Amino acid sequence: MTTFAALRERNYRFYWIGLVFYVLGHRAEYVTFAWLVWEVSRDALHLGYLGLAQGLPLVVFQLWGGVLADRMNRLRLLLATQVLTTATLVVAFALSALALIRVEHLLALAALSNTFRAFDEPTRMAMVPQMVGRDRLANAVALGSIPWQAGRMIGPSITGILIAAFGGTVGLAIAVVSSGMALAMYSRLRVDTKAGTPGGHMGTQLVEGLSFVRHNFVFAALICLALFNAVFGLSYVTLLPIFADVYFEAGSTGFGLLNAAHGTGALAGTLVVAYLAARFRRRGLIILVGAAGMGVGLAIFSQARGLGLALPVLAGVGFTNTFYLTQVSTHLQQAVPDHLRGRVMGLYALCWNLLPLGGLVGAVLAAAVSARFAVLVGGAMVAANAGVLLASRRLRLL
């Protein structure tokens, strides 16, 4: 078993290359829309509206996207969402190139794009097991995290530099080209993705998926770990500017270093999981120890007095975060019945899209007490959740 074993599968190779372009386009879109909204409005409130336009559709439609992924041909649904996303970006590019772009256009297009993404994400996750054998599934899940981790470090930086040099239209051009390349790669897939539950009422099927998770301790516990990570664990990301500027007195340079430390650790964690995926035993124990380790790391980071301690600790936080969540995703993919896969993975993806809520929780605690206190509480919540599950002994026997 090698680090890139799943890429030997033809379908997964095309999917993974397409995912690289998809993530690049996704990052370029988010950075460029934020810049254009600010450039056009010069109003911080409109940036808040943009966040709402991007986040609300994901929360509202993500679970329904999972239902559709279980009712329809998943490949066709993936291609349809990618076509619609690309078309949305083309409209945004055209309006910007013609100097017709307005805040109302950007908010509407952002909402449309993320509505399509709400149906895209559960479908994408549900397709992975159909592209690789079970023996390579863990490796495939880990490799699927690499574009996201690398994209977090590289995508915004490249887009920001190009926007600074040539303007927001170039950022939208990158998003359009990247989305089009992703579509080209996905069109090469040859996967048998017949619908598992084509009949029945969609509402009933949604309830069926939620009921399955609620009555299965392992699935409920794993999704709860992801939920606590999004709402409490990663809320510190919102507060990094305060740590860099106020506590460490390092300004924008310190902010960049802190982000790079987390991203480097996360990427390293993904690569380690990809290499060792087939060798893991007692995955439940590994997951819980990793979650507890992340919580403890956040507590240490919250009290750091300088970058000398903060940077390696934050790299460790990034490592443990990716390390245990990749294992969570792997077990969900391996254990979920295929006819429920879209709905269960849709619920899992919804946890990730609650990150803005976590940022809000952290910001409120920071405003009321301090940023150090907010990160300390977030880490304590993640560690406490892992501790409770560890004490139950039911999850660590996986």
Image (spheres, rainbow, N blue to C red):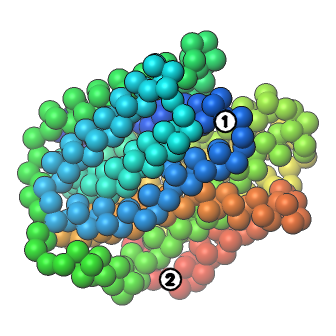
Q: CA distance from mark 2 to mark 1?
A: 54 Å
What x and y, as percent, mark residue 183?
Answer: 25, 33
Q: Is residue 347 above or below residue 302?
A: below
Name the one closer to the observer, 124 or 326: 124
- Residue 32 visible here: yes
356 vs 110, left or right, is right
Provide the residue designation for mark 2. 393
On-image quarter of the N terminus: top left
Provide the residue designation for mark 1. 41
Q: Secondary structure at mark 2?
A: loop
Residue under the point 65% across and 50% down: 48
Residue under the point 54% across and 61% down: 354
What x and y, as percent, mark residue 340?
Answer: 23, 71
Of labels 2 and 1, earlier in sequence is: 1
Residue under the point 59% across and 73% down: 386
Q: Is residue 15 above or below residue 278?
A: above
Using a 10 Å C-alpha cutoff, classify the residue at mark 1 as few (fewer than 14 neighbours), some (14 to 19) or many (20 or more).
Answer: few
Using a 10 Å C-alpha cutoff, classify the residue at mark 2 as few (fewer than 14 neighbours), some (14 to 19) or many (20 or more).
Answer: few
Q: Amino acid at mark 2?
A: Arg
Which mark, residue 330? none
**Quarter of the view holding residue 163:** top right
On-image quarter of the C terminus: bottom left
19 vs 263, left or right, is left
Q: Residue furthest front?
A: 100
Q: Is residue 54 above or below residue 150?
A: below
What x and y, as percent, mark residue 193?
Answer: 12, 54
> Marks 2 and 1: which is nearer the front?
1
281 vs 340, left or right, is right
Name the one closer to the observer, 313 or 99: 99
Residue under the point 91% across and 36% down: 249
